[in-house]
Structures are given as structure tokens and as C-alpha cells.
Image (cartoon, rainbow, N blue to C red):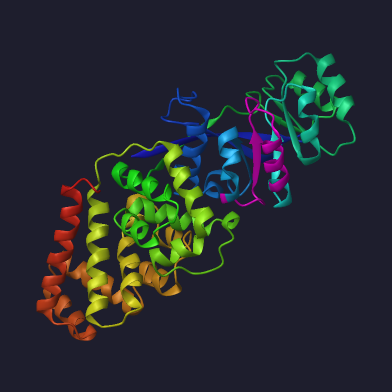
Amino acid sequence: MYSYVARQAILTADEKIHGYELLFRNSFENTFPDICPDQATSNILTNSHLTRGLESLTGNKLTYLNFTEETLLNNFPTSLDPKHVVIEILETVTVSHELLDTCRALKKQGYRLALDDHDFDPKWDIFLPYIDVIKVDVRQFNILQISKYIRRIQGGGVQLIAEKVETREEFEKLKTLGFELFQGYFFSKPEVIQSKQLSLNKLNLIDLIDQASKENLDLEAISKIVEKDVSLSFKLLRFINSVGSGSSQKIGSLKHALAYMGETELKKFICLLALAGLNAGKTEELCILSLIRAKFCEKLARDREDSENPPVAFLTGMFSLVDAILDEPMAQVATKLPLLDDIQSALIHQNGYLGDYLRLALSYEHGKWEETDSLAERLSISVDNIHTYYSEALEWANTLEATGQL
């Protein structure tokens, strides 16, 4: 499956790239699909940010993203790096004290806020101390109306973006009015970017939502749900790795990841996934094989009687094929995740004992029996046990698939 996002350049007065606005699409057709804005924002965050990374879509330029009332009040912006994103408050958002408190808190955390398609309504004046950018659709107002509003807010330190600029004559005239940034078909139409999408299983997501709705979170139960789904695991770690989540710790197990997030961030993550309304598609063979490897590596670690290794080994196997799933080099994908150095080294270079587990899985899958015997001897694991472990891992993954848990 693929995800789609359109990006449109925002330029400076000297026509250099200042940043990009990202717009949700559901195909290469460059029109906004018939879905609610909440869903559109959530899809960009889950399918673009948590999978590929917004920075790869914008070339590390500023990213402008639309946020609705619900996504703002649920603090979805805080999963993003405040240094690289501008939070656009949609014109359809209802003005409220709760929204004002949210904007004040986001501003305090270092986020830049923008009023999108601003209509000059005085009801927004109370928000202006927290607003960095105002976007004006120049097709909706005449020059006199725009000039009058600009004079009213002059001196407030707010940047003005002219949207839907279609001619050079408009561009030059708007510069004289005080606009510093410009967006429109005169410069560039939105270009659609296609990315591989990690599909979530709907039943797993429902189970996750059910767990999140309980008064006391059961990390053990949530961990068991997440460990069955490569997509959930990957997006969980991407969420943790975002600067907005404040992560600075390397992760060695899913339970560790869940505990590190804390209840508030974990519920936010689940809410984000639920709101995205992701449809479950047929599980790809690569995802099934990832689960087989995860369980196989876990069993190898248990055989060696190291209590710290099974969860670490499970994660190593789980993400061993994520490069093939996303069509990106492993070195590029693995560094997006807050994984222990040993896991990253195993995934990228097949180094260390975790690398040996992966090589053993590969040699067994490919029927390279001499290499399997050699690695078994190196790890002090009997060949008979290896056959048993792989059969059990295969049976575990097949059971998950047969019962609709994948």
C-alpha cells in the first residue's frame, strides 16, 4: 500500500524556498479527497511523519501543517519537532478559551503558530500574541481590505503569507503591502509524493483502543498487541523518537518503550492512530516473515538464558525487513528509530550476537545448512533446537494470521 501527500512551496520575496505546506492526498490525483479534515491531518502524521519522516518530504525546510480543533486540543502537534514545523490553525476551528490555552501552551513549548485562511475577524485578536504567521487568501479580499487589516495589526511581529498568488503583478503589489512570504500557482502547483505505507491491522487497533479506554493502562496487554504488528511497533518507536516527545533514551523492548512514553503520550499515540481511520489491508508476506524472525530470535535468546536478551532479540527480528517494506536502505530507516545501538548495529551490519541471530534466521530461511550448523555451534545452540524454534515461530505467526490478528 502507498500513502500520498502533496507539498506546495512557500517562497520569500526574493523567490527562495522558505518551506512547504503538506496537504493530504489519497492518490496521484492532485485534489483534496472527500474525507474530514481530522482524518487528513492524522493520515499525514501517521503515514508520512511516523513512517517516512516529514523532513524527508521537505528537504529539512520548514513544514506547514493544517490542524483542526480536535487535533489541536488532543495535542497532536507535540509529536513534531518545534524547530521544523509551523502549526496552521484552520479557519473552521471554533474560538474558545480551551483553544487559547492550547495555543498558549504550544507557544511556550517553542512551536510557531499560523492562522490559516485568516478572515480578519476581530474574534481572533486575543490569539495574536501567540501567532507567528497569518496566511491570507488574496482571492477572497480586495487590496483595500487587505491593506486596512495589515495596518491594524502592524507592529505585532507577525509574518504575512499571501496565498493563491497567481500572477507576477499580484506578487509585486503584495510585496509593497508588507507580505514577506508567498504561496500559489504562480510559483508552483502542489506536487504529489508517493511513499510506501505500513498498513495497520484493524483488529489490533481496536484492541489497542479498548486498552487505552481503561482507567488503568495494562502495559503488558498493550505490549502483546503491539508486538503482533510491525506497523504499530515501527510507528510507536517513530513517535517516541520525535523531538516533541522528548526522547533521549535508547529502546530495547516494546514494554520498555510503552513505559518510557508514559500514559499521556501513549494515549495520544493511540488516539492519533484511531483518528487516522487506517484501513486494514491484506497482510504482506514481508510482515509475516518479520514476525517469524522476531519470535525465532526471541527463542534463540531464551535458549542462551540471558533474561535481558529476549525482548531485544524480538525487536531485532521484528525490524529486520522494514527496509524492504518501506523500500528504503536499512541504514536510513534504522536511524529514524530510538533503538539500542546493538539493535541498530545488527540491523545495519549484522554485527554482534543480535547480528548472529539474524544471520541464523537468514541461513535457515534460505536452506544454507552448513552456515546454519556453523552459527549454531558459535552460539552454543543445538541444531535440533533451532529446527524446533523456527517451527514454533512459524506456527505462532500462522496462528496470528489465521485468527485475524495480522
Is 354 in the magenta? no
Q: Is residue 376 above or below residue 241?
A: below
Give the image quarter of residue 116: top right
Percent position of residue 371, x then y? 17, 76
In the image, taking residue 247 as reference, residue 216 lies left or right, namely left
Count the numbered circles shown: 0
Q: Position of residue 55 (x, y in %)?
A: 56, 49
Residue, far front = 215
Q: Quadrant of residue 4?
A: top left
Picture layout, residue 302 above or below residue 135: below
Where is residue 83 shown, x and y percent of the image? 67, 52
The structure residue drawn at horizontal position 65% and vertical position 50%, both measured from the top left corner, is: 82
Residue at 38% over, 50% down: 211
Q: Is residue 312 left or right of residue 38?
A: left
Query: Residue 313 vs residue 175: left or right?
Result: left
Near-viewer residue (250 or 142): 250
What segment carries the magenta color?
79-105
Q: Is residue 68 visible?
A: no
Q: Nearer the viewer, residue 29 or 137?
A: 137
* Above or below for 350 versus 224: below
Front-lying residue, 320 or 103: 103
> Can residue 369 be seen?
yes
Q: Could you tell me which residue is drawn at 41 percent across and 70 percent down?
A: 252
Residues 198 and 305: in front is 305
Determine if the magenta segment contains residue 98: yes
**At x 45% / y 68%, what residue is drawn?**
251
